[in-house]
Image (spheres, rainbow, N blue to C red):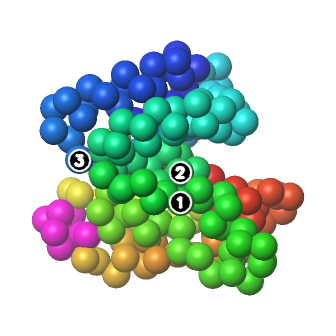
Amino acid sequence: MCLHKLNKNVLEESIDLPVEHGVNSIKTSLAADSGEWMRECGKLNLTSEEAHNVYLDYIPKYLKAGSPITLHLGGFFYCRKGSQNYELTSVKNNCGKKETALKRELYLHAKNTMYIAPNGQLLPCIPLTGGADFNIPKTYIQNAPLKELLNSSNYLSLIKSTLKDLMDKNGKCRDCDYKLECGGG
């Protein structure tokens, strides 16, 4: 689910509906100027601060409701269904040590969750739909059965990428002052 200016005030309702229909897991990501979102020219994009405020407002409600769904909030928060134990990714990324942050795998969730771009490319997260900047391996659902593709070396190498790998491939991230806190998105 993409979070943007038009739906930021209905995050709770947007998560409650899939829960009512038996969905076990949901992940939000910020709308980004990639793929189909480029048509909006950034008009609907939230800043990281705006998104974090939306998430920080919602998290206590989610936990009070008993964590009714496994929830990934845009690389910021993760909690399994029924658990009160959660991770704040930006805190986990840094851990106070540069070496620890750089070794962290970025897309562990992609072993259970993936995205299919409009062109059929398998990706571990929505922002990579504009993947040219990230120089990522190409894996397309048109080329083989999904099970085979999910076990392919290209896709597996991508989901095992570390923050250091991302920094090596992406100058924008490498030169950013917030790279250890953000973890590439």
| Mark 3 surroundings: few (<14), some (14-19) or many (≥20) residues within 10 A | few
Q: Secondary structure at mark 3?
A: loop
Q: Secondary structure at mark 2?
A: strand
Q: Secondary structure at mark 1?
A: strand
Residue highlighted by disc 2: 77
Q: Quadrant of residue 27?
A: top left
| Mark 1 surroundings: few (<14), some (14-19) or many (≥20) residues within 10 A | some
On the picture, is 149 further left or further right than 116? left
Where the N terminus falls, by quadrant?
Answer: top left
Q: Is residue 107 magenta?
A: no
Where does the image place residue 74, in percent across and percent down from the top left? 53, 46
Q: Nearer the viewer, residue 63 or 28?
A: 63
CA gap between label 1 and label 2 equals 6 Å
Q: Which of marks 3 and 1 precedes in the sequence?
A: 3
Residue highlighted by disc 1: 87
Question: Would residue 123 be seen by someone viewing this image from the given angle?
Answer: no
> Going 42% across and 26% down the picture, which residue do you hit?
12
Q: CB of mark 1 within 8 Å of CB of mark 2?
A: yes
Which residues, given as a range, are shown in magenta?
143-150
Residue highlighted by disc 3: 24
> Going 45% across and 26% down the picture, which residue do you hit?
11
The type of residue carrying mark 3 is: Asn
> Going 77% across and 78% down the picture, which residue do you hit?
97
